[in-house]
Amino acid sequence: MGETAPAAGKPGPLGVGVKEAFLSLHLGRPLLGQRVGDLLAVLAALADESPGGFSLVGHGTAGPIALHAAALEPRVVALTLDGAITSWSEVVRTPLARDQLANVVPDALTSYDLPDLAATLAPRPLNIRSAVDPTGRPSSQEQVVAASAVVGDAYRGRGADASPTVHAGPPRPNREPLVRAVDLSVGESQTVARADGKTATVKLLGVDEHRDPIRSAVREAKVSVEINGTPHDRRGSTLKKSLVP
């Protein structure tokens, strides 16, 4: 990622470049835009060495970077997106997305989504393979095709010789996790499917946080929930014991 590459560290739910991503948003210069600019600068520097143009491959979180660069640079003659997300709208609709902060562009969805951007590449070859959903899990062929429907329409409308090629990745794991996680606001409820096939309705009644007086860091959190109509008070991670069969 050049100068915007994050410092070495263990990746968390928001990605390894959390500090860099937050700082770039505070400065009004999203990391995605900076990285697209870096990529365009590299392509411009290599233009004389590649008179026939460039074929880009965007892997993982670099997928949206390569897609934006291809849309802006006509010397990109072919694009492959490998293991990348296919839609920002899906990120918004996913309660617990992973590793998406570095590619956040404020208010982008008021103007376009990733399939809209991909449609501008027609009639240049576009290959989408092993796409993932916002949680990082492999997307099904149906999900990828649905998200890329606007791309196929654009290619057909422009009389392209070939439509975008779409290949789903490996099948999703068929083992069910033993625990479940819910993201609730106070007063909100959600029905959770347990590992044994039964369901439990969880409602968050209240949260009591104890903070460090110096750093204001949360040192202990007590939650009051209602599980299938029965109130429970739990601290820390002990709540999961009430949900696991």
Image (cartoon, rainbow, N blue to C red):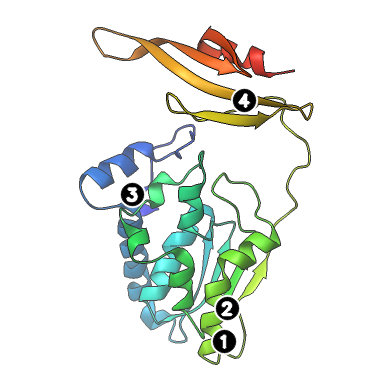
Evaluate if marks 3 and 4 touch, with contact meaning CB atoms under 8 Å apart: no
* Dot placed on the residue nearer the N-terminal end, 3 or 4: 3
Task: Say what amino acid the circle numbered 2 marks.
Answer: Gly
Percent position (x, y) of residue 141?
Answer: 69, 62
* Dot placed on the residue nearer the N-terminal end, 3 or 1: 3
Distance from the alpha carbon under mark 4 to that under mark 1: 47 Å
Percent position (x, y) of residue 205?
Answer: 46, 17
* Dot placed on the residue nearer the N-terminal end, 4 or 2: 2
Evaluate if marks 3 and 2 touch, with contact meaning CB atoms under 8 Å apart: no
Percent position (x, y) of residue 75?
Answer: 41, 81
Percent position (x, y) of residue 60?
Answer: 54, 54
Which of the two marks, 4 or 2, is nearer to us in this view? 4
Residue under label 3: 4
Residue under label 4: 201
Residue under label 2: 152
Distance from the alpha carbon under mark 2 to that under mark 1: 6 Å
* Dot placed on the residue nearer the N-terminal end, 3 or 2: 3
Asked whether, in this view, residue 206 is left or right of residue 90, the answer is left
213 over 92 or under it: above or below: above
Task: Say what amino acid the circle numbered 3 marks.
Answer: Thr
Distance from the alpha carbon under mark 3 to that under mark 1: 37 Å
Distance from the alpha carbon under mark 4 to that under mark 2: 41 Å
Residue under label 1: 156
As rendered, which of 38 and 185 lies closer to the eye? 185
Query: How dense is the environment of label 3, judged by Cα within 10 Å: few (below 14), some, or many (20 and up)?
Result: some
